Every structure is written in C-alpha cells, then in structure tokens.
Amino acid sequence: MEIFEIVTYFVLLALLSTAIRVVTTSNVIHAAISLVFTLALTAILFLMLSTEFVALVLVLVYIGAVIVLFLFGIMITRAPLGKNAELDNDKNKKLGAAIAGSIFLLFSYILINGFGGDVTITSGSSTELLGEILLSRFVFPFELVSFVLLAALIGGITLARKDEALIDEDQV
Amino acid sequence: MIVQPVLVVAAALFSLGIYGILVRRNAVMVLLSIELILNSVNINFIMFDTMLADTLMQGQIFTIFIITIAAAEVGIGLAIVLMLFRNRQTANINEFDLMKW
C-alpha cells in the first residue's frame, strides 16, 4: 500500500508538470507532445482507479486520433516550428494567471472541504457490465452521440474542403 | 487511494486550461488548452465514480461520452481554423474579428 501511494503522488506530480508545459512552452510541437504525456498519465491514473475500459478508450481516441489531428493542424496552419516568441499574448499573461489562480483556489477550497477520505480499490470494474449498461439504460444518449459524430464528419468535410464553384463566383 | 490530491490536481489542470485559453495567440494552441479542461473533467468523473461505487457506472459512461464529443469538437474546430487560415493566411486569433462590430 505504501508503494501504491508513492506511485500515485509521482503520477500526479508528473501530470501537473506536463500540463504546465502544455500551456507555457513556446514551441508548438512540444506543446502537442506534452499533451500526449498528460493524456498517457491520465490513462495510468484511470488504470490505478480500476477503470480499465475508459483508460483504453482515452489512449485510443485521444492519443491515437486527436493528437494526430492536432499535429496535422499545426503543420497545415504553418505555425512556425521551433521557438516562437509570438505564440503568447504578453498583455494577457498577468490577467490570465490571476483568473486561473483564483479559479484554482476556489475549486480546491470547495473540493478539499466537501470531499475527503480514502478509496480502497478491491477489484477491477467489469467491461461487460459497462457495455450492458451503455446499451440498456443509456442507449438513447448512445445513439444521439453517433448522430453527433455523423454531423461532425459531414460538417468537417464541408468546412475544410475547397468549393470550386464558390471561388469562381467570388463568394468566398 | 486518497481522494483529495487527485481532485486538487484535476482543479489545477482546469485552471491551467483556462490560462492557456486566455494567453495563447495561436488558435490550435487554444484548442489544445480546451482538451486540457475536458481531461480534468474526465479525471473528476472517474474519481467520483470510484469513490461512490455507483452500480450504474454513470461516471465512466459520461467520461466515454465526453471523450467522443471532444473528438467531434476537435474535428470541427480544426476545420474552422483551417478555413480561417485559408482565407486570412494566419492562425492568430486576434485577427479573427469578422463577427465583431
């Protein structure tokens, strides 16, 4: 149990430091790679909380798909690779830090006062049971999400492709 | 596992995402900060799901839904950024004042 706690604190500290690197680094590729580490550490945290299926979904969807999309986005928008002093808006830095700090203090005050105690993890959660609940009690939101994905697919194609007819008529 | 440190780290991730949204100039970096916020919400959901030992596993199911919606959001968001970049030759969000009056 002692080792488990040390590992937990190590994971949480690493999570915090990689997240700080995502928002402070002046290199766009480093920010995306730091987000990969943040998400991987989150998946490890989920595994330690015995929610294996969600951890695997996080690795597959986020690290597998979303980060690849982000890297494509960074490279297509020709964000200058390497160090870039123009990436941050220096005027907003103090205000942003003040707002973020006050939100953090408020949230942590409420969470520390409201919740406490120790969670003992006895066994892993059943993926079979999760699937049964997802397709019985939550089947309507499940279908709705599939519709949202279809709408996002069509919307993404419509937005990103070049419409030759519109360009000819100078409507873009 | 002790509950409070995990919740405090999730709150820290949330405020770091807010900081990133306010400070970053590049639109893709703003989307990256939004991912950080969604991730902190996921951590909170999973922590409370384990803490309350819910028989319906609603925390895990909501986390799966959030991950799905986030993937859709990134697809649409990057498509919009791409279109703006094609029309304006920049990804700097200070330049995107088309809907400002």
Image: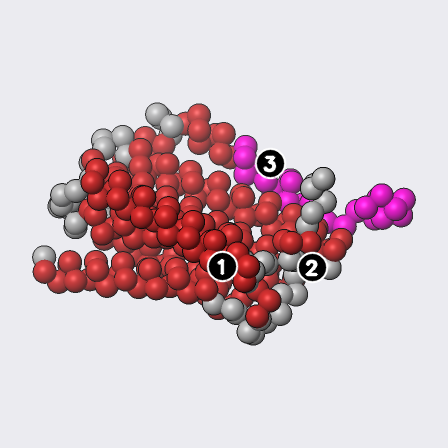
Viewer-proximal residue, A37 or A9? A9
Q: What chain letter is assigned to the residue under label 2?
A: B
Give the amino acid at mark 3: Ala
Return the residue at label 3.
A151
Category of crowding for the residue at label 2, using alpha-carbon neighbours closer than 10 angstroms: few (below 14), some (14–19), many (at least 20): some
Which badge, 3 or 1, comes first in the chain's sequence? 1
Residue lying at 51% horizontally and 69% vertically, measured from the top left: A26
Question: Gap in Å between the C-alphas at discs 3 and 1?
Answer: 36 Å
Residue lying at 65% horizontally and 40% vertically, measured from the top left: A155
Q: What chain letter is assigned to the residue under label 1?
A: A
Identify the coloring.
Answer: secondary structure
- In which quadrant of the rendered view does residue B55 lie? top left
Return the residue at label 1.
A93
Q: Which residues are magenta?
A: A147-172
- In which quadrant of the rendered view does residue B65 lie? top left
Considering only vertical position in the picture, is A71 above or below A166?
below
Q: How far across and how far down the image is residue A144, in percent?
A: 49, 29
